Amino acid sequence: MKSILRVALLFFSFSLSANAQDEATLRTRIDSLAGEQLKQTDGIGFIVGIYVNGEKYYYSYGANDPGTRDRADTSTIFEIGPLSETFTAVTYARLTIDGKIGYDDPLQKYLPVDVPSPVYQKIICSPMKDAENPFGIGDERHHTFTPYVCVPDVSEKPQPILICYLATHTSGLPEYPQNLKTAKDKNDPFSRYSRQDLYDFLKNYSLLEPIGYDYRHSPLGISLLGHVLALHEKKSFEDVVTDNLLRPLGMTNTGIGVTENIKYKFINGYNPTGKSVPHWTYDVLAPSGAFHSSMGDMMRFLEANIGGKNELKNVLDYTHNPRVRLNDHKTGLQEIALGWKVSPLGIESSRITWQGGITGGFASYVGFVETSHSGVVILSNCSVPLQEFGQKILQVLNK
């Protein structure tokens, strides 16, 4: 692995820009940042896409596999993992704007009639009527306790989960369902978690606290959102996203199923130690992490979010609006939008709208500064975080 780094920094670049001097300066700065990132991936590569001033630039670094000089290009396929969440949120937003579903409809409206949505029901506890005669513990009658009875408070209606809570991670649902453990495979952790497993979880889960609109990141919630969108549209989840997002933007290399057309473009994934790991697959939890894509497609997505007019412009702008405000000093997160996170750029009052994540052998990042119409996409086939790298690139673009 170390030999890859000793070979030299492998990169190529091409762009649509006529301003060669500005592009050369940009490339030099990004090369420096990429060199630091390559030390963390031990030479396993990544591709960077830049959108600035209406121009696109692409830079590829490192190698796709140890001991080779093969490098990713704009058609190479990567797992994008939790970045899939953004596609789910955009699809939800479009169906909302088109009037096909209600933004704040109850989750129960879209579930099968025999599958209950979890609700919060206030519980009242009071001493038993004969509590003046306390119970003793064993033979030691001087150790006593007063028994209480807890029952639902019928004076208050149960608080239901709304689908907008799923989209903003404020539903109170856990990160993952407890019964995921029974279906989990260490090398492919979500592949065997089925629709029936999800329904079994819902039938046995109760919210212990009121839904207080507090942010709690829940891939389970996003997966449940995508699942009910598919039920409502009477299509597979992949088809719903394709119809509402991928096809309108011409993202032909993006999907869940691996067809013969893209199979040969799908590169291997590696963990941070350089070990090859299998691709992850998904069943009902697909909306939170199942998509794969190429740099060419992800740049179309980025440009649609910050570029000129397009069919989805109003929908994409709608997803950028913050829904939840945070004060997370540890992560720097300030706000949660639909499928996006919002953090300070570190330059004046500029803010980054971003999303990203990691699978077993891949990492992805999309971030942009809406006010300057600048953004970056990074796709890597090594599961080393990209958020800091992406933010530094955006700082370069906005200085």
Image: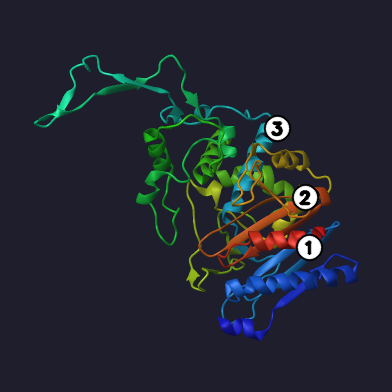
- In this view, the residue farthest toward the front is 142
- Quarter of the image where the C terminus is located: bottom right
Alpha carbons under labels 1 and 3: distance apart: 35 Å
Q: Nearer the viewer, residue 308 or 120?
A: 120
Residue 178 is situated, as x and y percent measured from the top left of the image, at 39, 44
Alpha carbons under labels 3 and 2: distance apart: 28 Å
Camera-near label (1 vs 3) is: 1
Instruction: Answer left or right for 342 relative to 232.
Output: right
Q: Which residue is mark 3?
A: 97
Which mark is first along the chain, 3 or 1?
A: 3
Check disc 2 and report its element: helix, strand or loop. loop
Which mark is first along the chain, 2 or 1?
A: 2
Please say which color scheme the image uses. Answer: rainbow
Which label number is shown at residue 350?
2
Mark 1 is on which residue type? Val
Which mark is first along the chain, 2 or 3?
A: 3
Residue 384 is situated, as x and y percent measured from the top left of the image, at 57, 65
Q: Which residue is mark 1?
A: 396
What residue appears at the point 41 percent right and 28 percent down from the top-left corner?
Answer: 114
